[in-house]
Image (cartoon, rainbow, N blue to C red):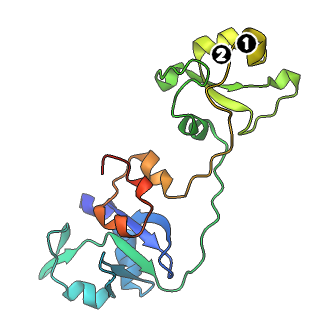
Amino acid sequence: MNIMLDASVLVLNRVYLPIRVTTVRMALGLIYQGRAVAILPDYSTYDFDAWLARKPDARPSLGIVGGRLGVPRVIVLSAYDGVPRHEVRFTRRNVYARDGHRCQYCSATPGSEELNLDHVHPTSRGGPSSWENVVTCCVRCNRRKADRRPEDVGMSLLRKPKKPRWHPLHEVVRDGRERPAEWRHFVDESLFGKSA
């Protein structure tokens, strides 16, 4: 199985807004069915026949009968112009991500096995399980705080917890998937960080 078929492809709606990431396999299927076109950083677009006829440049390509087929890095859907609603789910993983896997009391960054979730205002005292009341906490600080408020034990938060407002494509960054340079023309530079 060619690993290149599982590489990441950015999907844009028909007004060129990024809406999700898919695989090369799915992208080529969408292009073949006429539901999308491949697009290059110079904004030239290619339907399946044009993409097939195009000679791949230095970009990755797939071996096919009779030659090579370039791997699209960005596609544009032909009919979809909506932007999916994306609500960041309240999960342990997302709270850890929001807090940078850092204890919000002592700033420690132990491994995940040494992290807990802490209700700033304890549930036993009416505190809700919500973005605004739950923080990442190391085991040591969680034991110290116990079933009390931070101010009751002389602790303070690094920052007030709040609901994050991530763009759906930040999932790509958190999952550690590749972010091809061709995406830079279509997405916010903050997705690339300092490493790309």
Callout 2 amino acid? Asn
SS label for mark 1? loop
Q: Residue at x 65, y 48 (%)?
A: 89
Corner quadrant of residue 179:
bottom left
Classify residue 56 as left or right of residue 38. left
Q: Is residue 80 above or below residue 193?
A: below
Q: Are marks 1 and 2 in contact (CB under 8 Å)?
A: yes
Q: Residue 29: horizontal and vertical position, in percent? A: 38, 77
Determine which of the numbered discs, if any, sits on residue 142 in the image.
2
Q: Is residue 34 visible?
A: yes
How packed is label 1: few (under 14 Cα within 10 Å), some, or many (20 or more)? some
Residue at 68% x, 15% y: name it: 155
Question: Which element type, helix, strand or loop, lies under badge 2?
Answer: helix
Check the picture and name the quadrant holding the N terminus. bottom left
Relative to 182, does residue 196 appear above or below in the rendering?
above
Residue 62: horizontal and vertical position, in percent? 19, 70
Asked whether, in this view, residue 102 is left or right of residue 8, the answer is: right
Q: Is residue 1 visible?
A: no
User: Residue 35, position in %: x, y?
Assistant: 45, 84
Is 186 situated left or right of 90 in this image? left
**Which label is found at residue 93?**
none
Pointer 1: what residue? Answer: 146
97 in relation to 171, above or below: above
Report the residue that reaches farthest toward the bottom. 49
Q: Residues within 10 Å of mark 2 (few under 14, many from 20)?
A: some
